[in-house]
Amino acid sequence: MRKIIERATTRGYTVTSGALRLLEQAEAPLETLEEAMRRLEQSGLMIIDESLLMKLLGAKEGAQEPAVMAEKEEAVELLEELMIDVDERFLKEWRIQGTSEEFQRYFSSRYEKLSGLLRERLGSVVSLREAMRLRESQEANVIVMLLEKRETRKVWILRVDDPSGEHKIIVPKEPVLGDSPELLLPDMVFGARIMKSGDALIGRELILPDLAAEHLEKISINISACMISDIHAGSKHFREDLFESFLDWINRGRDPEAKDVKFLIIAGDLIDGAGVYPNQHKELEIFSVEEQLEKLSRFLSEIPEHVRIIIGPGNHDPVQRALPQPPLPEKYQKILKKSGKSFFFVGNPAWIKLAGRLFLIYHGQGLDDVIQHVISFSHSSLETDLGEALKLLLKCRHLCPIYGETTPIIPMPEDLLVIDRVPHIFHSGHVHAAYVGSYRGVRIVNSGTWQEQTSYQRSIGLEPTVGVMSLVNLGDLSIKFRKFA
Ligand SMILES: [Fe+2]
């Protein structure tokens, strides 16, 4: 297995765990791997997955069912340390027609996925239509999507709907049980304990899908992953000197912390891009996207051989802007590959497993809308608000809860922005402020930036955290934060 992984990774390919299991049972694993790489060479894809191997092996020896490798625990351990396992749904580019049915299907998916999570917490639930038929003062649970929220001196008025129809829930401004109405944002799906009162539904308790408290299992490995984002190579404000200090640190063979780094995760905004915002050219040192990537590639060529680089896109990178973003296009990947390093390109968001630890990697575009909509949050006080904004995403179990604001979302058949699993590590970026914390067992990291304050950031009072990286030990999930000078 080590040979398979080594041979694939040195050529820039990634083998998924399903594919590896199939290869392991193939008569000639390395030959089959070579054949898979040959096939992929023509397509430009870099991931060897189960479906490709099923095709190959099926053609050679008839489709084989993967058997369980129970007796090979030692080998599996070794494999888990080395390999990257990825949710392949996030690697594709979604295409839509823009019909109303597509939007309807998207919001139905969002509602169904989140109401599935809420049902686990609420138990019995009635529809809004059924709620209106309750007896006076009778209580019940409903699961609804927020259409609009208004506030008067004494109450919150929540206009909500579910598949049975639309109604208002009146929430008195006396202390409410559960989550605060202030945290509810348009298009969020939440539960409510309601009481029928005349023609109205009175909200007694509001319940976001949230996370259950997780038990953290330590594993005995000494491997760590380094998390950064928002490099913005090509910008006049890119702090090359600090990035050089980081490269200098990661190459220190005698530093035990640097030596244990096996993965470098870059959560988007690799470069500053071009035409991302009005008058951007005034703040660019390099105008072409290709040359910006060339510059980054020269920096990344200094990453040591034993570190695999995982790259997701951000809103400044040359890829479709709407979420979920596919991985960087092949023509741009090629520029980075000139560095001769081992890359693994993922979409945004991305769910990947490294050494058995589940990462949710998200550039963080939806944070802007959340920070703007929650009255108590502001871009000028991110040192206190960023952690709360990131926790709110986990509590509402959605990466971009508000539809139709500054972050475009593709109305895909399944809402892939629902946080439907519980990650070990939630890594985000985009707002250029650093944060390290945890919520119900999930380690949360916002990895700051390598770009000095821009004129736009100055105008909104945003103070970036420049030249930082976070280091997570994949054994005990402890996180260290390091600022370079
Ligand atoms: Fe950025």
Image (spheres, rainbow, N blue to C red):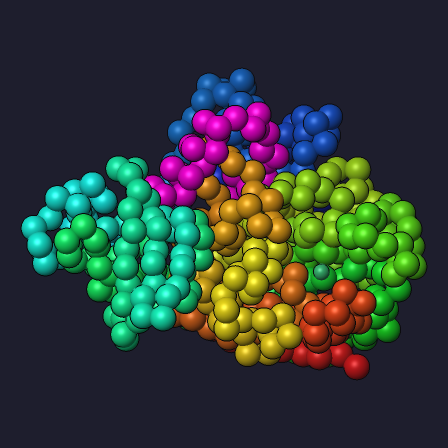
Would you place residue 218 above or below residue 275 in this image? Answer: below
On the image, the x and y values in percent for residue 221 come to: 51, 68
Is residue 55 inside the magenta stretch? no
Q: In which quarter of the image is residue 166?
A: top left
Residue numbers of the magenta segment: 87-113
Residue placed farthest to the left in the image?
Answer: 135
Side (left or right) of 317 relative to 150:
right
Would you place residue 57 above or below residue 16 in this image? Answer: above
Residue at 38 percent across and 37 percent down: it is 108
Residue at 82 percent across and 48 percent down: it is 275
Residue at 75 percent across and 59 percent down: it is 305
Q: Is residue 353 visible?
A: no
Side (left or right) of 238 relative to 89:
right
On the image, the x and y values in percent for residue 100 come to: 48, 28
Would you place residue 164 above or below residue 373 in this image? Answer: above
On the image, the x and y values in percent for residue 212 come to: 32, 64
Q: Is residue 373 visible?
A: yes
Front residue of 439/403: it is: 403
Where does the C terminus fall, quadrant-wise? Answer: bottom right
Q: How many labels does the image show?
A: 0
On the image, the x and y values in percent for residue 226 come to: 64, 67
Residue at 50 percent across and 73 percent down: it is 376
Front residue of 170/267: it is: 170
For ligand 1, the image quadrant comes to bottom right
Side (left or right) of 29 relative to 137:
right
